[in-house]
Image: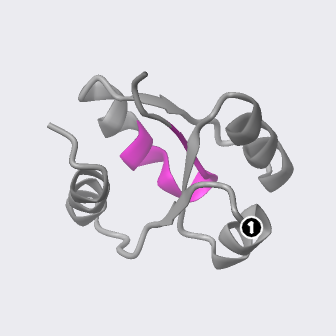
Amino acid sequence: MSIKFIADVMLGKLAKWLRILGIDTLYSSSFDDKEIIFLAVNESRIVLTRDNRLQKDLGNKKSVLIKSDNLFEQLSQVIDTFNLK
């Protein structure tokens, strides 16, 4: 089973580059927090977010709070966190 992500509206560029790297990443600028949570749960996706409130709302669901607003630092964080090649 491969890893799958869903990125919040603040991470469009990160989502684009994860897709370019061949990583299954769902993104839409129209997703609201409830849709992101629903899709994450129903499609077993890990939420990538810059929103502290969304991460709190996720509770025990898998998520990563992206710390930087720099694209290359964001990519590094995801790649390092999940040991992606």
Would residue 39 be found to the left or right of residue 82 on screen? right
Give the residue type that dot 1 points to.
Gly
Quarter of the image that includes the N terminus: top left
Label 1 element class: loop
Say how the picture is coloured: one colour
Query: Residue 21 placed where, x, y %?
Result: 24, 29
Say which quarter of the image contains residue 22.
top left
Q: Is residue 30 visible?
A: no
Main SS category, magenta section: helix
On the image, numbered disc 1 is attached to which residue? 59
Nearer to the camera, 41 or 14: 41
Instruction: Bin the neighbour count of mark 1 within 10 Å (Cα to Cα): few under 14, some 14-19, many 20 and up.
Output: few
Would residue 61 be found to the left or right of residue 65 on screen? right
Decide whether residue 63 is among the magenta residues.
no
Would residue 58 be found to the left or right of residue 23 on screen? right
Nearer to the camera, 60 or 40: 60
Residue 51, compared with residue 85, is above or below; it is below
Query: Residue 17 placed where, x, y %?
Result: 30, 38
Please name the residue shown 76% across and 48% down the image: 37
Please name the residue shown 21% across and 48% down the image: 83
Query: Residue 73 placed where, x, y %?
Result: 23, 65
Decide whether residue 14 is among the magenta residues.
yes
Would residue 81 be found to the left or right of residue 39 on screen? left
Q: Which residues are magenta?
A: 5-15
Residue 58, compared with residue 68, is above or below; it is above
Say which quarter of the image contains residue 56.
bottom right
